[in-house]
Each structure stands twice: as structure tokens, then as C-alpha cells.
Amino acid sequence: MTKLIAAAKQEGTLNVIALPPTWANYGNIIKAFAKKYGIKVVSQNPEGSSQDEVNAVKSENGTSKAPDVLDVGMAVALVSTSLFAPYQVSTWSSIPAAQKDPKGLWTQDYGGYMSVGYNSAKFGTITSMSQLLGPKFKNSVSLNGNPTAANAALNGVMMANLAAGGTADSIAKGVDFFHSLKQAGNFVPVQATPATIKAGTTPIVLNWDYLNTASVVGQGANWKVFVPSNAELAGYYAQAVNKTAPHPAAARLWEEFLYSQTAGGGQNLWLQGGARPVEMTAMTSDSSIDTSAASALPPVTGTTVFLTPTQATSAATYLSAHWAQAVK
Amino acid sequence: MAVAATTTAAGARPVRAGRRPSLAWLGTVPFLGYVAVFLLLPTGIVLWNAIRNPTAGGFELSNLKQLFNSTERSYFTGSLELSAASSVIAAVLGAILAYAVASGNPDGVVRRLYLSGSGVLAQFGGVTLAFAFNAAIGPTSGFLFHAGWYYNFPAGIGLIYTYFQIPLMVLVFLPAIDGLKAQWREACENLGGSTWQYWRHVAAPLLAPAFIGATLLLFANALSAYATIQAWENQISYTVPQQIYIAINSEVGLASNAGDVLALGMVVMVAIIMIGYFLLQRRAARWLR
């Protein structure tokens, strides 16, 4: 570890990509890493998508500005492993086996549950997805993007699907739910952002819980978030190191920092941003977890559903043929 | 120069007494270079990618069959509906407005105000326009909120498009109305023609090519608009440009070369419109000299 720190300091720079400062506390994580090790963090295209990250690795291959490390969705991670260098962090054993590549080509880092965020001053308390079809939710319900393009939106439809009694193998009931939502006049096709929430255009947003917290969307105590009890759908992002990283030691030190279980380490910093770190179970049992941040998460009690790559692909294929027709 | 060259060379041996090639064509090099880099090259790349087999390499025309799937067709229908609705409405309203402006004082403040205002508003689009509409008329204002129809396609987004289409119509149609000479009307009246007859037999036939040409321009303008509809109807693809975005950026595994195929379809559509526009402009220009 000492040798790794020395080598990383020698390199002096770390290139990261597609890490929005308000996303899962990344703004503070980057600052904390830069301060702790005195390494300059260059953040490229913070609003980019997972696909943009992989595209940048390819197009900037061999240059000093190529991204050293990636934080990508699983769909992209699984088809891009030829670009990654295997690396196992020192806390490797705390990560559940299902959430990492055996060689360490990718390792899931943090995730969350699909949730419903809403303005309780306007609507009172909401507890289930089926309520959203009611007449008081006219022009109110919005996704985070187009489900045929954005992973968060696809999972929003999948959450509706599970809540309507569907299974992870077929997203059809979720598409039917949105069809009913559109028929009821409750669906809003505008891209949900903190600005549209503030303006009242999208007062109800289906999104990952860590992107739906009051502080991320810029709302006060009236903004409530819940995970529907019959549709507990989780999704994780994954870390990977660029095989041809211009700063290989800094890249690996960054991974060590992100998976560190200390009070100021990456795992607790993600938790403070409302995301669930991958080592959460291990950290809860050895009490290294930030308990106040953990108790602020929306409660989850039932059986968690994870989409397998096959289920995600079949959902996307179904959506590409049926989504637009259902909500037009 | 040419003469001097022949006389000096004449004594030595017979040379071709031709003129030196004119270098005037050099003046068009920047323009042709611009067209090559920003029009021909991208079109070529789109064509190349559209017919290439993404996995096996080589070329195949079967990619283009995608254009005729019912899903793909629906994006073209959507683009056509939206462009037709917004361009026809904007053309009619813009033409009336242009006539009103033209019949005022040609050096007056009102005319200058309208022209500079139209120049600015014709470029006002994208996310800014979507938010401005939202704040002024949409949900935030409270006005019409419960109607909800402005999320309907193409009514809602078509209405938003007219905000930049009408000013564009005023700009492109005003020269045609200015071209109507007062003498023509006087001649018509001298011959006993009524106002209706003047419009029916003189003004309308004269203005028709310019009007249809301007409508086609608006149509192409709406066809290629992307940012406005992407901000307003983000979660549903109605138009071809929206679907091209998905084909390029999908992070759920739907990215494919369909983007290039759709883009090729757009190129063909715009080419047809522009040829029509060119023919009509040529006809209209006869009367505007």
C-alpha cells in the first residue's frame, strides 16, 4: 500500500469521467481523495453516460487524458471487459461474490433501489404505485429519461412491472401500467431534472433512491422518497480500471480509496450521498458503517430483485418494440 | 498578357497561342471546401456506415430494410406530421403577419422592430424555448395546466415549434410581398378588377411559388429540430432525430447502426424538399427582379 501511494503521488494526476458532483456524493469523494493524497483529479464530461465512458476509453487510447477509471452500468461493463485491467482491492473479501468479476475485471461499487420521489405538500402521503393512476395525479408522473436509452428509466418501468404483479423476466405489465398512466393523463414526458421538479412540471419522479433524495433534487422536507414494498428493485454500478490507463498507480489507489471502510473512506462517503455501498453488509456487522447515514435511507423490507443481464436485455428488446406505442 | 506571350514566343518556335487558364475558379475554393467538409463528407460517412455490416464487415443493403419496419416508419410519420402541422400553420400566420408588415411604412419603426425581432426569435429554440414555454404558458404558470394537451403529439410540441417557425416565415416571405408592385394593383383596378379579382388572378399566382417554397423551408427546419422536442417529449421517441439519439446513446443495449440508417432516410427526405424548394425559388424569382 505504501508503495502504491508513493507511485500514485509520483504520477500526480488521476483522470475520471462521467462523475456528476451531485451523483452519489461524488463531488465530496473527489475532493476527499485529492486532499488525502495530494493527487490532482481531472474530471472529464461529468454528465456523460456509461456508453460515453467506454467510447472515451477507445477514442483517447494512448493519450494522457484517457480516463484511468470507469464507473459504468452493468450492461456496459459486461460487454466491455476487454478494455479493463483486473484488480482486486484489499477489501475484496467484503464484497459479495455475485457482485464482482472473479478476476476483478469489474467490481460493483454502490447501488440503490428504484424509488418514487414526490412532493408531499401537494399530494399527501403516497405508499404504492397503483395510487399514481388516481385522478389527483394529473400531469405529474415522470421517469428519468427514455427507457429505451436510459438505464434508470428502464428500471422505473420494471419497478411498475413488479408492482403490477409482473416478474423480472417480462416487463410487459410495466409497459401496460404506463399505458394506463398515459390514458389517465398522469404521465409527463418532460425530462425530470431538479429544475423541472422545482418548477412543478414533474412533481413525482421515478428514479434510483440516491438520485431522488431531497438534497440531490434541491427540495426541502416536503420531498419524500419511498421504495414500493412489492417492487424492491435494486441496481448497482461497477468500477473498472482502464487497461491502458495513463496513471495506473493512481487508478488503483483510487479504487482502494473507494472501497475503504474507514470513516472518511469511499464506502461511507457513498452512503452519505444516499447510495448503498457494496460492502454495506460486511460493514454493518463489523460496525464500521456510518449508522446515521444508513438510517436515512428509504426502508426496504421485502425480497430484493436484481435484474440479470439476460432479463435486462429482454426488457430492453420488449421496450424497443412496445414503449413508444404504449405511451403515445 | 496573352498577346505579349504569343509575340515573344513567335520567333522561336510555334507554340500554342491559347489563353492562360482563368484563375477565377480559385474564388470558389473556400466555398467548395466548406461544402466538402461540412456537407459531402458527413453525408458520405452516414452512407458508408448505413450500408456496412457492423459485425462481419463488408457491405449490405439489407440494413436499409430497417427503414420500412413499422416501428421505424412510425418515427418518419411522426417527423412528417410534426413538420407538416407546424410549417403549414406557421406559413399561414407568418404570411399574414408579413403582409401586415409590408403594407406599413417601409422605413418605419414597426417594420424594423418586426424584422429584428423575427431575426432573433427565428433562432430561439431548444431547451431554452421549452423552458420558456413551460414557465410562460405551461404548468408553472398555472394557465392551461389541467388541460395537459400540450404533451400530446403533435399538438403541444407543434404549438411550441410555431414560436420559431412564424418569425422565420416573416423573414423569408417578406421579400416576396415587397415584390408585389403597386402598379399591378392599379392596373387591375383600371381594368375594372375588384379586390377579390386582384388577389385571385394577380397576387395569389405571383406569390404561390414563394409561399410554397417558404413552407418547404419551414418544413425542413422543423424536420431537423431536435433539442426542443428532446426537452419536451424526452421519454418518448416521436421523431427520427430523437430515435437517432437513442441508436447512438442507448445504455440499455439498444445502440446500433440504425442511427446511420435513419440519418440516411433523413438525408433523402431533406434532399427531396430542397430540390422542390430550389425549383420553386427559381420560378418565384422571375417576378421579383
Image (spheres, coloured by chain):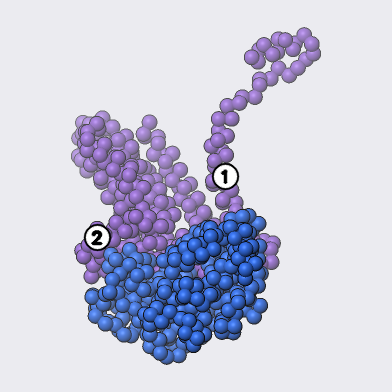
Chain colours: A blue, B purple
Using the image, determine if residue B33 lies above or below residue B94.
above
Residue B244 lies, in percent from the top left, at 50, 62
Residue B156 lies, in percent from the top left, at 31, 63
Residue type, label 2: Ile
- Residue B75 visible to an observer of this rendering: no
The dot on residue A19 is none
Return the residue at label 2. B137
Using the image, determine if residue A76 lies above or below residue A67.
below
Q: Residue at x 57, y 70 (%)?
A: A255
Left of B117 or right of it: where is B230? right
Residue A208 lies, in percent from the top left, at 42, 76
Q: Residue at x 34, y 83 (%)?
A: A129
Using the image, determine if residue B81 lies above or below residue A184.
above
The dot on residue B37 is 1
Mark 1 residue crowding within 10 angstroms, few (<14) / some (14–19) / many (20+): few
Evaluate whether label 2 is on the same chain as label 1.
yes
Residue A219 lies, in percent from the top left, at 30, 69
Residue type, label 1: Val
Mark 2 residue crowding within 10 angstroms, few (<14) / some (14–19) / many (20+): some
Q: Residue at x 65, y 15 (%)?
A: B2
Assign a secondary structure to mark 1: helix
Which quarter shows the N terminus of chain A? bottom right
Using the image, determine if residue A221 lies above or below residue B201.
below
Q: Is residue A159 or residue A249 the one in the foreground?
A: A249
